[in-house]
């Protein structure tokens, strides 16, 4: 009722005409973006790339929302978007190497199009590297670009989950966290990123993907959101027999990095 009254007032005051015109403009922009998307090469050609460690692939898939969103909000600032994208991926890979330097097998869980995975390949060149993501296109890209293998359930020494639980609604987060931990060998550990805790858990429908409807292979918005856990709700998610610590490093400057391990005496 309140929304209907608000629209009536807007229509009477003339605001409604602008509102409707903006809605039409948004749909036209989205349509043009969808048409453009179909003509982009699978791997984007970047006019600027930061200096990368030797062997790290600069390939970015055209549907990689983790790159396309900062490029969009920056108004096409390639330097800013590429710096943020590659910088965040390298930060988490370095934290993984520091936390589990002897890992011989690892799983890039929810690895998307390889923001972190490309750096894991460089930091763990001799390790058995697996990737899991619900997007078939992302899985294929990581396999073709730097040789990650599709995860088949094999236990690993290290699980890296960058910006995964930040997008899972609370009803799904517990099951996926348990799935990550079940993938670990007895002495293994998981690196998981979270937004800073909020007083109450918050779930927002706006995500990088919802802002870019033209991208193919979209995830179901019913399952994919922007999630900020309260400390109490996060602690309830961590299964019995497991513990965690927060690293001083940050992921992309916006997320905390947690190291999750079995509690002392657990096996």
Image (tube, rainbow, N blue to C red):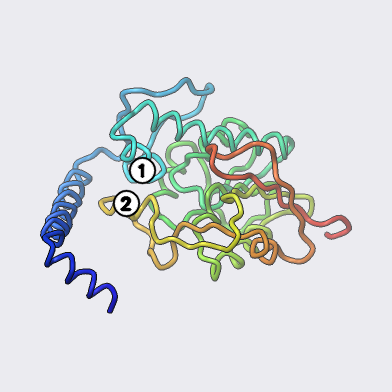
Q: Is residue 53 left or right of residue 61?
A: right
- Mark 2 and mark 1: span between their CA atoms? 7 Å
Secondary element under disc 1, as helix, strand or loop, is helix
- x, y (%) of residue 262? 78, 56
Residue with the mark numbered 2: 211
Left or right: 87 with respect to 100?
left
Q: Residues within 10 Å of mark 2 (few under 14, many from 20)?
A: some
The quarter of the image holding the N terminus is bottom left
Give the quarter of the image for residue 101.
top right
186 to 75, vertically: above or below? below
Q: Between 249 and 143, which is closer to the camera in this rendering?
A: 249
**Would you place residue 2 above or below residue 265 in this image?**
below
Label 1 crowding class (10 Å Cα cut-off): few <14, some 14-19, many 20+?
some
x and y, in percent, of residue 50 in the image: 44, 22
Assign a secondary structure to mark 2.
loop
| Marked residue nearer the N-terminal end (2 or 1) | 1
Which of 154/73 is in front?
73
* Residue name at image x 56 percent, y 63 percent: 201
Q: Which mark is residue 85?
A: none
């Amino acid at each position: 009722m309140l929304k209907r009254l608000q629209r009536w007032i807007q229509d009477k005051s003339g605001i409604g005409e602008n509102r409707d015109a903006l809605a039409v403009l948004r749909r036209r922009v989205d349509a043009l973006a969808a048409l453009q998307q179909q003509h982009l090469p699978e791997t984007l050609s970047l006019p600027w790339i930061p200096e990368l460690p030797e062997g790290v692939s600069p390939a970015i898939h055209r549907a990689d929302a983790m790159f396309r969103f900062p490029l969009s909000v920056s108004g096409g600032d390639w330097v800013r978007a590429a710096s943020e994208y590659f910088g965040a991926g390298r930060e988490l890979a370095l934290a993984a190497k520091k936390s589990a330097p002897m890992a011989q097998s690892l799983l890039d869980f929810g690895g998307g199009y390889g923001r972190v995975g490309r750096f894991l390949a460089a930091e763990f060149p001799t390790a058995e590297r697996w990737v899991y993501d619900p997007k078939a296109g992302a899985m294929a890209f990581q396999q073709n670009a730097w040789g990650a293998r599709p995860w088949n359930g094999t236990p690993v020494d290290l699980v890296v989950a960058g910006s995964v639980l930040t997008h899972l609604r609370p009803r799904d987060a517990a099951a996926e966290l348990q799935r990550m931990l079940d993938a670990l060998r007895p002495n293994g550990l998981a690196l998981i990123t979270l937004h800073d805790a909020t007083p109450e858990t918050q779930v927002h429908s706006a995500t990088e993907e919802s802002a870019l409807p033209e991208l193919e292979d979209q995830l179901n918005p019913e399952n994919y959101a922007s999630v900020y856990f309260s400390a109490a709700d996060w602690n309830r998610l961590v299964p019995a027999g497991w513990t965690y610590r927060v690293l001083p490093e940050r992921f992309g400057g916006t997320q905390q990095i947690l190291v999750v391990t079995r509690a002392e005496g657990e096996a």
